[in-house]
Amino acid sequence: PGRERRPNSDNGFPPNMNTWDVIAEMLESGRTAELERYLESLKPAETARAVARLDEEKRELLFKALSPGEAAAVILDLPDAQAAGVIENLEPENAAQIVELLPDNERADVLGDVPENTASAILDRMSPEEAREARQLMAYPDNTAGGLMTKDYLAYGGDWTTARVIDDLRTHRDRYASYNVQYVYVVTVDGGLAGILRLRDLLLAPSDCRLSDLMIREIVAVSAEDPLENLSAIFHKQN
């Protein structure tokens, strides 16, 4: 889940006070709602630095105090190694609630960076479907296309109009909020891939245009097992 950055409002602390000290003070005084608003105002680098400067006890208290959704948003602000360290030190039940709310590729990255027994304990407490998908993505080495892959995608029939697609995106905005996508897949009646459509082209097209008239038909595909060197070569060739 992404977060909207808000201007830092007056929180009663000196403006030059360190962010980690502000967080610690809010934790000690039980100002959880205000703490969440304060974290929303920070840039990712500021969040990462603040979490790193908290002692282990305060860090654990922070992620227990936050809602799972807000905790997941903070995790997304952290470098992979730091995020894994935070998750590793949480109780598996608490960690599972947070990890389930991460985009699927981020979820696999975090779980892949914690000890195997810790990852297993967290996966056992996740929903069966989320755990199954996480295990599938974790099976791919980092240096392959599968290591970058996400299972979150948007797919619509070629006869859908742009207006209908945009209406679907708005209707299901909560479900799609964590999707990190730049393309829409256009599929045939039997689910086969017919083409792709850039979101930019979708948004700028007339509302009555059919996806089949806008889509890119010449598709470049790779195997999930392909090494990243192959992907790099393809990107350079295409550009």
Image (tube, rainbow, N blue to C red):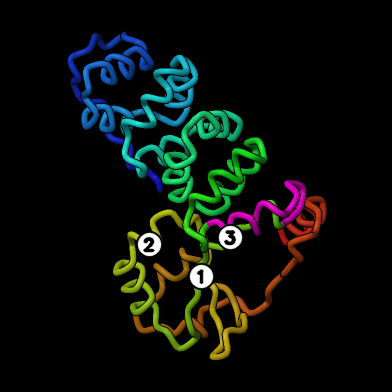
- Across and down, in percent, residue 146 comes to 70, 57
The residue that label 3 is drawn on is 133
Of the two numbered discs 1 and 2 in the rendering, the one whose residue sits closer to the viewer: 2
The residue that label 1 is drawn on is 184
Residue type marked 3: Glu
Residue 206 can be seen, yes or no:
no
Type of secondary structure dominating the magenta stretch: helix
The residue that label 2 is drawn on is 175
- Residue occupying image coordinates x 54% and y 51%: 124
Task: Give the mark nearer the N terminus: 2 vs 3.
Answer: 3
Q: Are marks 2 and 3 in contact (CB under 8 Å)?
A: no
- Residue occupying image coordinates x 36% and y 84%: 208
User: Is residue 155 toward the left or the right of residue 225 in the image?
Assistant: left
Question: How many residues crowd around disc 1 within 10 Å: few (fewer than 14), some, or many (20 or more)?
Answer: some
Question: How many residues crowd around disc 2 within 10 Å: few (fewer than 14), some, or many (20 or more)?
Answer: few
- Across and down, in percent, residue 183 comes to 53, 65
Q: Which mark is residue 158?
A: none
User: Is residue 30 toward the left or the right of residue 237 in the image?
Assistant: left
Of the two numbered discs 2 and 3 in the rendering, the one whose residue sits closer to the viewer: 3
Q: CA distance from mark 3 to mark 1?
A: 21 Å
Residue 136 appears in which quarter of the rendering? Answer: bottom right
Residue type marked 2: Arg
Residue type marked 1: Val
Q: Which residues are magenta?
A: 131-145
Quadrant where the image shows the C terminus: bottom right
Q: CA distance from mark 1 to mark 2?
A: 15 Å
Q: Secondary structure at mark 2?
A: helix
Q: Is residue 138 above or below residue 224?
A: above
Question: Which of 214/180 is in front?
Answer: 180
Q: Is residue 167 above or below residue 173?
A: below
- Across and down, in percent, residue 196 comes to 57, 73
141 falls in the magenta region = yes
